[in-house]
Image (cartoon, rainbow, N blue to C red):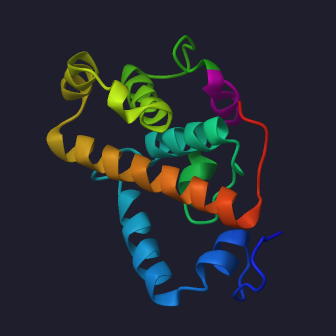
Amino acid sequence: MSWLASVAPGDNDVDRTFGLLPDAYARFRELYGALWNPDFLAPETLELCRSRITGLLGAAVDDPLCGAAARAVPAAKRAALPAYDRSPLFSETERACIAYAEQYVLDPHGFTDADFARLRGLLDAKQIATLTLAVAMFDALARFRLALTGTVERAS
């Protein structure tokens, strides 16, 4: 479903909506795809952050752009995501990254020196930059979908 009067051809709501701007969509896909490079940050960690963001915003959980990373997260871990901060299924790094993603969505002004000290203890500067760009893009894509496609689910 789309709230737009017309959409572009495509296999999914992102393609049909973002496809109205093909040049921008191509650049977005290139940057978005580069984020999933395991040399920067574990794709599973990014997928956990992306899933948490979509859950908080009540956006569609599926993402046709992330592919294999979404399939790499075990079902039990995905189900435990709302309780990531107390579940033994998550590593300390995953917890810190998910907490960062959560804070970004809820109130980016709420970041503290302690939040960044925790991240610096677990990630290098390149990984923190990757995480921040990824979280910004996940948030933007979720809000884009909510605003233009009407694809809404109950937040978890």
Q: Is residue 146 above or below residue 25?
A: above
The residue under the point 59% across, 54% down is 142
135 or 38: which is nearer to us?
Answer: 135
Decide whether the magenta segment is chiefly helix, strand or loop.
Answer: helix
42 or 132: which is nearer to us?
Answer: 132
Quarter of the image where one finds residue 95: top left
The residue under the point 72% across, 89% down is 9
Quarter of the image where one finds residue 118: top left
Taking the magenta stretch, the answer to whether it contains residue 7 is no
Q: Position of residue 126 (x, y in %)?
A: 19, 47
State whether residue 73 appears in this view: no
Q: Position of residue 4 (x, y in %)?
A: 75, 77
In the orientation shown, which residue stands out farthest toward the left? 125
In the orientation shown, which residue stands out farthest toward the right? 1
Q: Is residue 40 above or below residue 121?
A: below
All told, the count of numbered labels is 0
Q: Position of residue 98 (x, y in %)?
A: 46, 31
Q: Quadrant of the N terminus?
A: bottom right
Q: Quick check: 106 left or right of 51?
A: left
State whether residue 127 appears in this view: yes
Q: Quick check: 54 left or right of 134?
A: right
The residue under the point 64% across, 65% down is 64
Q: Quadrant of the C terminus?
A: top right
Q: Position of residue 13 (x, y in %)?
A: 72, 70
The stretch in magenta equals: 74-82
71 or 154: which is nearer to us?
Answer: 154
Q: Is residue 25 above or below residue 97?
A: below
Q: Quick check: 87 left or right of 116?
A: right
